[in-house]
Each structure stands twice: as structure tokens, then as C-alpha cells.
Image: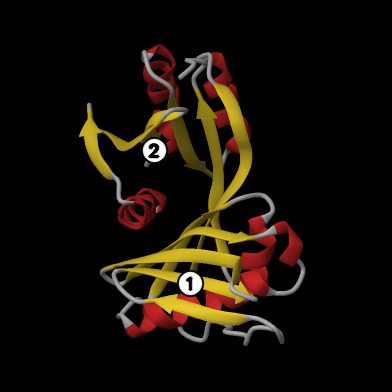
Amino acid sequence: MIGELVERWHRGWIAADGLTSERRDGYLVVHVDRPHRRYEWIATDDAETAEMARIVAASAEPNWLSVPTLAPRKVIAELEAAGLVVARPDETFMRRALAGHPAPEPPAGYAVEVTEGPVIGVRVLADGEVAASGFMAVVGRDAVAHRIETSEAHRRRGLGSVVMGALVGEAVRAGAETGLLFASTDGVHLYVRLGWEKISDLVVAQNTVSP
């Protein structure tokens, strides 16, 4: 089941970020094409970790490997044994049924700006400056959240919840029913408060090739 959800999440991620992907030797590879991450390999089954880690470690360009797993310690050991550097050992793969998602109003002094489309954009503005923002790509019945951010000066004011509520509202109107996301260690607290549930842990590693 995790593998299917990972596939669905990846389709939303590449739509949100304007990327492409392919299968290499049966493994899922996203063309990120950035200086510090040329490709991101994504495991749809953590039993593939050791072999995928060997491939990524031996590649000539800077590559990452992301592994959703229910056994993070085992995965970390396999990644390190292959020579990869574990950059994010404790991220979280999450989902939520979108019906009934909280949608708080912005605090006084803030305004919400929404851009509609297959990739929905939301910005929370304060005096014309962006205080918080995020994207959500709708692919079929799934909606994938991406780059949910709040600027340092505007944190602890509930703006992340405002962004997520606005994104989900638009996604539901576009036909989405299920939300999927990869959450950072800090971000997971926000999503739990909004009713998102954990699917699995997520371990992210990279090779030692310099850009």
C-alpha cells in the first residue's frame, strides 16, 4: 500500500514543481536538475533500499535517495553501509481525507491571495509582503502539498494553517479527495494539528559527489 501512495504523491510533486520522472531498471527517478540534486531516486518499497543506495552512491552526479519506510533504523544502516550521507533521517509521509479540513481565517492585518489551476498557489500577505505561502497540485482525486513556508518574522501566528486551509478548499473544489505530503520534522506538528495522519517514516540520503 505504501508503494501505491508513494507513486501517487510523486505524481503530484512533479506536477507542483514542473519536473519529469522515469523508470530506470524498475526504479522511480525524478529529474530535479539542480546543482546539488541532479536526480532524486524514490523507493516505492524499502526492500529496494540497499540496491538503490549502491546505484546512487556510484553515480557521477549529485543524487538523492528518498525511502518511505516503517523501519527507519534498518534503512539508515543500509544507506550508510552503501556510502550515502543521511541528510534527513526523520521526515514523515502523511495523508488526510480532505473533506472537513480546517480552514481558519487569517489574523488581523493579513490577507490571503489564491491562484487557481492544476497547481494551486496561496500567499498570505502582510502590507504587501509575503508572510506565508504554499502550493498544492491536484492530480485526479489526489492533492499534494508542496513548499508550505512561513517567513521567520511571521511564525507562531497560525499562518501555516491558513495556507493549508486555503489550498485544501481550492483542491476540494477541483475534485480532490485525498491529501498527500512529505513533512519535515518541524512541519509535521502543523499537519498533525490539522488532522493529517502518518503513513510512514521518510529517510532522505545523498551521495558525496560535489556539484
Give the residue furthest to the front. 128
* Cα gap from disc 2 to disc 1, whole angstroms: 27 Å
In the rendered image, the vertical position of residue 70 relative to residue 192, given as above or below: above
Single out the mark in the foreground, 2 or 1: 1
Three-letter code, disc 1: Val
The x, y position of residue 15, in whole percent, is: 30, 56
> With 159 as the anchor, is 50 left or right in this view?
left
Residue 150, picture quadrant: bottom right
Give the secondary structure at mark 2: strand
The x, y position of residue 40, in whole percent, is: 39, 34
Q: Residue at x 73, y 66 (%)?
A: 154
Residue closer to the observer: 143 or 78: 143
> With 204 as the anchor, is 31 left or right in this view?
left
Give the residue number, with chain letter if any, for mark 1: 122
On the rendered image, what quadrant is the N terminus found in?
bottom left
Give the secondary structure at mark 1: strand
Q: Residue at x 47, y 38 (%)?
A: 67
Residue closer to the observer: 138 or 98: 138
**Label 2 Cα neighbours within 10 Å, binned few <14 / some 14-19 / many ≥20:** many
> With 163 as the anchor, is 119 left or right in this view?
left
The x, y position of residue 14, in whole percent, is: 32, 50
**Label 1 Cα neighbours within 10 Å, binned few <14 / some 14-19 / many ≥20:** many
Q: Residue at x 59, y 27 (%)?
A: 86
Tag shown at residue 42: 2
The x, y position of residue 182, in whole percent, is: 51, 53
Q: Earlier in the sequence, mark 2 or mark 1?
A: 2
Tag shown at residue 202: none
